[in-house]
Image (cartoon, rainbow, N blue to C red):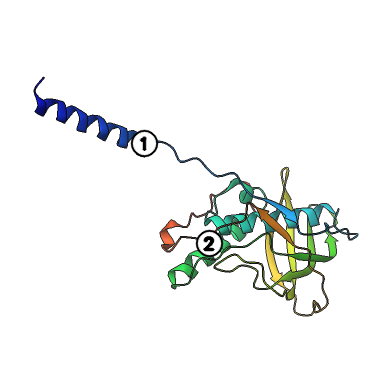
Amino acid sequence: MPKVERTTLVVLALMSVIVLAGCAPTKQQPLPSPTWSGSAPTGPLESDTWVVGARASLSAQAIAQNRNDFSLDVLTNTTGEELRTRLFTSARESVRAGNESVVSPGPTPFAPSEVVVADDDASAVVRGCLADDWASSDGAVPSRLRAHGVEFRLQRSGDRTLMVENASVPGLDCSQAELPIALFSPAPEPSQVSDPADIVRPAPVADDE
């Protein structure tokens, strides 16, 4: 075989390897697990199913924010569509405005103080203190935590408990709140996202309300 033909075959073979490697599916990284820093909270409300649901949503929100992917199942299964859309829009508009994409070292710290369950047991309001300024561009744990009053509205949707709304409660005194901290393992890395188009919008779910 002439030398020119051998060279051509080698080049074609290398190109085939590159193309096949480029077409290989990207392996999805496993979701991080939050681990309590110190002792887990043991207050009287911690075992309440609505508080458990609120914490699950806060964890999922932080994971979605860190990955700039609001279509993740962990978010869909814990957080209502309207709230997911608000979170996505906030992240996209922040990057569009030229801000750095932020990451959270763990779920936003929250100390529950009250749970009010509806008469039909299909929804509830969870009130408490939520940490301020938890997320940052480097994902570091703040040296000092401050908090504000918040209430989460949750509802049952099939076999899911969804956080569907959050709102500030200015009258709730959080100056002495003890906020339990959980950190993700593995720890999140600073985001490389600078294009709003790279932020994945939430997927709609038929039975979300």
Sequence-wise, the earlier of marks 2 and 1 is: 1
In the figure, is residue 26 to the left or right of 113?
left
How dense is the environment of label 1, judged by Cα within 10 Å: few (below 14), some, or many (20 and up)? few
Mark 1 = which residue?
21
Residue nearest the observer in this picture, 59 or 81:
59
Residue in view at x 55 percent, y 54 percent = 70
Q: Position of residue 7 (x, y in %)?
A: 15, 30
Which residue type does callout 1 highlight? Answer: Ala
Quadrant of the rendered image containing residue 43: bottom right
How many numbered markers are drawn? Answer: 2
Residue in view at x 82 percent, y 52 percent = 49
Q: Position of residue 171 (x, y in %)?
A: 79, 80
Q: Position of residue 198 (x, y in %)?
A: 43, 57
Find the distance from the CA under tag 2 to the CA under tag 1: 27 Å
Residue in view at x 84 percent, y 62 percent = 115
Quadrant of the rendered image containing residue 153: bottom right
In the figure, is residue 76 to the left or right of 109?
left
Mark 2 = which residue?
190
Q: Position of residue 45 (x, y in %)?
A: 87, 59
Which residue type does callout 2 highlight? Answer: Pro
SS at mark 2 in the image? loop
Residue nearest the observer in this picture, 56 or 66:
66
Quadrant where the C terminus sits is bottom right
The residue lying furthest to the front in this view is: 3
The residue lying furthest to the right in this view is: 44
Quadrant of the rendered image containing residue 9: top left
Residue nearest the observer in this picture, 2 or 79:
2
SS at mark 1 in the image? helix
Residue in view at x 11 percent, y 19 percent = 1
Residue nearest the observer in this picture, 38 or 122:
38
